[in-house]
Image: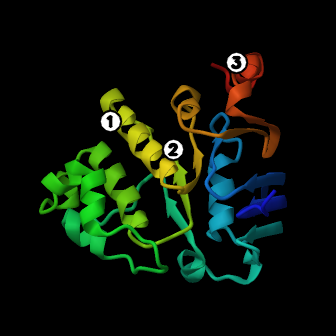
Amino acid sequence: MAAPLLQVSNLNAWYGESHILHGVDMTVREGETITILGRNGVGKTTTLRTIMGIIRERKGEIRFNGRDMAGVPLHRTAHVGLGFVPEERGIFSTLTVEENLMLPPVVAEGGMPVAEIYELFPNLYERRGSPGTKLSGGEQQMLAIARILRTGVKLLILDEPTEGLAPVIVQRIGEILKTLKERGMTVLMVEQNFRFASRIADRFYLMDHGKMVADFPVGELPERMDTLHKVLGV
């Protein structure tokens, strides 16, 4: 079996004196879509932010594409091949859709051309001249994802991509992620809607109290439902 694209080992992280992550272990292989499930406050977003290097008070090992990420400064993370779409999306509201798309630098070969992005996101093509302030929440999420795809990153990291979106937009986001999966994109996402995630993910990590308490493929989802109900409270 090929070496993992992302390997996280015994990862601990703190916010000041608050110890949030307690020995997180996780692997993501090239071409996989991995979903981290868990209730609010268990450390899901902290895990993503620590992988990206946003949280620097940490111990443990993060290796991406064989490289130890400990010495990589935050402003170089994208150049290594990690692309992060935070829950707040982070688009520039005063810039148009197309200006937002063109703003991030291309960091590696294989980035998606703007014309191809518009084929994948026809809503963005229709709104290409509109400023971010005029976009719906779903359009902003699509723009945030599309902007990363243009840069040529190897791993797309999404934090709650369906949070607060209408069902029809959630369905569209799911279709886009399926298309990216078919094209070989590697995706790591945090998502509370495990029914949505079950249509996309290859594997799940279940998180509770700052550590991974289960790791299983999508095919085991039916037999894991009792555990999911208990841990997720759904």
Mark 2 or mark 1, earlier in chain: 2
Mark 3 or mark 1, earlier in chain: 1
Query: Which amino acid, mark 2?
Result: Glu
Alpha-carbon span between mark 2 and mark 3: 22 Å
Q: Position of residue 117 (x, y in %)?
A: 30, 60
Residue at 57 percent of width and 82 percent of height: 76
Alpha-carbon span between mark 3 and mark 1: 26 Å
Q: What element does badge 3 sit on?
A: helix
The circle drawn on residue 198 is none
Query: Which amino acid, mark 1?
Result: Ile
The colour scheme applied to this rendered structure is rainbow
Tell me whether the residue at label 2 lies in contact with that at label 1, contact meaning CB atoms closer than 8 angstroms.
no
Residue at 70 percent of width and 27 percent of height: 219
Q: Quadrant of residue 136?
A: top left
Mark toward the viewer: 2 or 3: 3
Q: Is residue 210 above or below residue 108?
A: above
Disc 3: which residue: 222
Disc 1: which residue: 169
Residue at 67 percent of width and 32 percent of height: 218
For disc 2, the neighbor class at 10 Å (few under 14, some 14 to 19, many from 20) is many
Q: What element does badge 1 sit on?
A: helix
Disc 2: which residue: 160
Q: Position of residue 51 (x, y in %)?
A: 68, 64
